[in-house]
Image (spheres, rainbow, N blue to C red):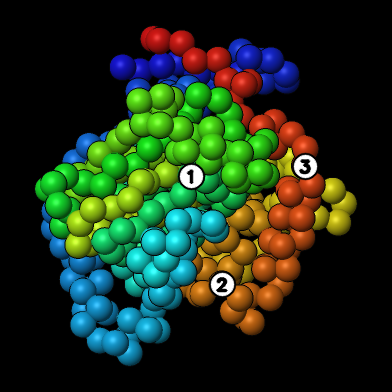
Amino acid sequence: MQYEVKYRDGPNYGKDATGTFNQHTVDFIQNRFCVYRNFIPKEVIDIHMDVWKTIEASQDMTDAVFDAEVEPIPNSPSSSKYTSKGGHTTPMGVSMHRWIHKKLANEFDLRLEATYSFTRKYDRGAYLKAHCDRPSCEVSATICTGYASDDGEPWTIWVDNTRNWVDEGQGDQEKIFNETQGVPMRKRKGIPIKLEVGDLLLYQGPNVIHWRDHFLGNYSYHMFLHFFARSVSKLDRITNEDHEFYWETEKYEGSTVGNPRSVLMYDGRDNPYRQKNDPADRENELRFSKWMELYEKCPNKSSYVNNYDDLEINKK
């Protein structure tokens, strides 16, 4: 199914916004998430798992790449502490991020800009407490690259898209939990999704509450690949004379004339390969942190993050 897209109002009223959107793109905009089944071929998964397991086979490499996490999300159940290892900008995460970015360019009708990747292995008893994400995760992808569960099924991820959570999601975390994951299973309004190896869930990270209940199994490998919707995002409107969102520079990978760098590109790093807090990225990280201060003070984040109100979408 193809959809015609036009601007609703303003100076671009009646003009094509991007031409057409496919069903996945419309689902992402209207439902705040979409699922791609069999998105990643087995051979691509195998290549990345070979890298991951090679790192795991060496304690020195494991210690260099991963952190033993006390808890992925604060105030998680005490029984779930130290049941995961996570890494920002791992070799397999960076390469999978690039691969998915390129494939989404042909499968998803918003132009995305890469921010960062994160990889995590969960062990028995792991738990992901209900939360939503920061603006670097405006468009987020989550995948499972391998698992061994007690029931032979992939570990369920829940998403709650019953309302736009971005204005409250970074606030009272216990309130968020009590209204979503903390609700008895039979009364939950969230949607349970099982992602087999090769499937991909694309969701509005800051706008959708998401979580996983206790994991019953030996292990579950996951990658999180984050973007922002450069072609239509309104995040660039959060700015002032001292905190610009875009600026002209040639100091980044893929630089082209007339294509200014955004403050969110590579999550404030010079390129996708550097770790956070690399001294070489001091200038970009300072821009990023100053802009984040502006964002955090913004009382109506829903006006900017994944806001598609000015798009008129109709079936062709």
Closer to the camera, 152 or 242?
Answer: 152
Label 3: which residue? 298
**Does the CB distance between marks 1 and 2 fall below 8 Å?**
no
**Where residue 130 is drawn, which disc sits there?**
1
Give me the residue at 23% from left, 53% from top. Answer: 216
Give me the residue at 57% from left, 39% from top. Answer: 176
Closer to the camera, 302 or 29?
Answer: 302
| Residue type for callout 2 | Lys
Q: Can residue 128 be seen in this view?
A: yes
Residue 109 placed where, x, y %?
Answer: 42, 33
Compute the Cα span from label 3 to label 2.
Answer: 24 Å
Q: Is mark 1 on a helix, strand or loop?
A: strand
Q: Residues within 10 Å of mark 2 (few under 14, many from 20)?
A: some
Residue 171 placed where, x, y %?
Answer: 67, 44
Closer to the camera, 65 or 256?
Answer: 65
For discs 3 and 1, the disc positioned in front in the rendered view:
1
Quadrant of the rendered structure where residue 25 is? top left
Q: Residues within 10 Å of mark 1 (few under 14, many from 20)?
A: many
Counting residues from the N terminus, which is met first, the one under dot 3 or under dot 1? 1
For discs 1 and 2, the disc positioned in front in the rendered view:
1
| Residue type for callout 3 | Cys
Quadrant in which the C terminus is drawn: top left
Quadrant in which the N terminus is drawn: top left
Label 2: which residue? 276
